[in-house]
Image (cartoon, helix red, strand yellow):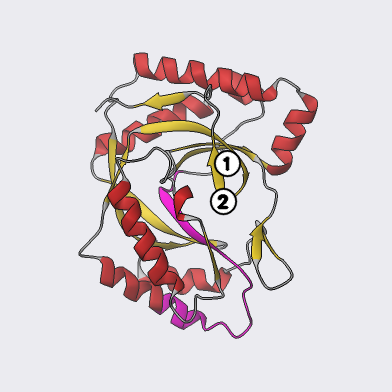
């Protein structure tokens, strides 16, 4: 995903993200896109362990935005919301429908995760914090992100075991939650705005490849030490209430 050939292919399929809309004056703002997700704590709230990693990401994001081809192309994610998604859960119309048909949906969802986390802690090994390393930029149809790779097999198994416990849980399945994506570890830096006809796609792909080469000798590590159920109203802020369940990995 971080090789030049991948960019050459992906730049042909870029699309404007529907999660943002253009307002008078030229500013793009996040549209309503509510739901729940399981993520690491967003930087700027409780994630002091990954402060160095996230500080570097801020710098990388700024470098990306300052490129001539990216100034109007990429809508930046607020750095305080940088996070790694461990499991996509439910969003948009599926979430709205679930709430309409089941008034207790959110309470039942939180209860499910309390049980899942308790069972996971008592039965699954290894339970140590998993360690990941930035690999480079990853180009998706509607976004650009930092791609992460596990530093060892246990780090990978830690996340995969957790995802398995979630997506195979009968109570969650009954609530309408199912796995829709394979796990690709990444931290989103920004979403695409308008894709103009005159966008030099070849140059854009080459630019991303050159950034990767520039960053190759300074790739920061990321520690997955917590998994948190979070709610979101759009793609710029992920929050939790005090009673939302949290899984803390042993160090």
> How many angstroms separate mark 2 from mark 1 (CA)?
22 Å
The dot on residue 41 is none
| Residues marked 2 and 1 touching at CB (< 8 Å) | no
Asked if the stretch drawn in magenta spans residue 117, the answer is no
Question: Which quadrant of the structure image shows residue 60?
Answer: bottom left
Drawn side of residue 94 relative to residue 63, left or right: right
Residue on which disc 1 sits: 180
Q: Is residue 170 in view?
A: no
Q: Which quarter of the rendering shows the C terminus? A: top left
The residue at 73%/30% (across/down) is 98
Q: Residues within 10 Å of mark 1 (few under 14, many from 20)?
A: few
Residue on which disc 2 sits: 236
- 203 in relation to 220, above or below: below
Residue range (magenta):
183-206
Badge nearest the viewer, 2 or 1: 2
Q: Which quarter of the rendering shows the N terminus? A: bottom left
Q: Is residue 186 in view?
A: yes
Identify the mark nearer the N-term, 2 or 1.
1
- Where disc 1 sits, the SS reads loop
Q: Position of residue 36 (x, y in %)?
A: 59, 36
Q: Position of residue 153 (x, y in %)?
A: 25, 38
The residue at 60%/19% (across/down) is 171
Of the pair 119 and 77, the residue shown nearer to us: 77
The residue at 74%/36% (across/down) is 96
- 1 in relation to 200, above or below: above
The residue at 41%/64% (across/down) is 61
- Where disc 2 sits, the SS reads loop
């Amino acid at each position: 995903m971080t090789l030049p050939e991948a960019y050459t292919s992906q730049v042909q399929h870029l699309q404007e993200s529907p999660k943002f809309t253009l307002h008078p004056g030229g500013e793009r703002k996040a549209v309503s896109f509510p739901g729940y997700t399981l993520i690491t704590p967003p930087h700027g709230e409780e994630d002091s362990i990954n402060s160095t990693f996230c500080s570097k990401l801020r710098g990388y994001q700024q470098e990306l935005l300052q490129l001539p081809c990216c100034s109007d192309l990429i809508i930046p994610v607020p750095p305080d919301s940088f996070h790694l998604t461990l499991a996509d859960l439910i969003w948009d119309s599926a979430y709205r429908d679930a709430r309409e048909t089941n008034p207790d949906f959110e309470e039942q969802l939180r209860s499910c995760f309390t049980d899942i986390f308790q069972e996971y802690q008592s039965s699954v090994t290894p339970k140590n914090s998993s360690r990941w390393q930035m690999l480079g930029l990853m180009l998706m149809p509607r976004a650009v992100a930092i791609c992460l790779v596990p530093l060892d097999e246990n780090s990978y198994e830690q996340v995969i075991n957790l995802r398995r416990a979630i997506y195979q849980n009968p109570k969650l399945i009954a609530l309408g939650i199912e796995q829709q994506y394979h796990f690709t570890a990444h931290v989103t830096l920004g979403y695409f705005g308008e894709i103009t006809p005159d966008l030099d796609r070849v140059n854009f792909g080459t630019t991303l490849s050159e950034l990767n080469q520039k960053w190759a000798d300074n790739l920061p590590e990321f520690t997955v030490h917590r998994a948190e159920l979070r709610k979101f109203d759009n793609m710029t802020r992920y929050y939790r209430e005090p009673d939302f369940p949290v899984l803390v990995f042993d160090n």
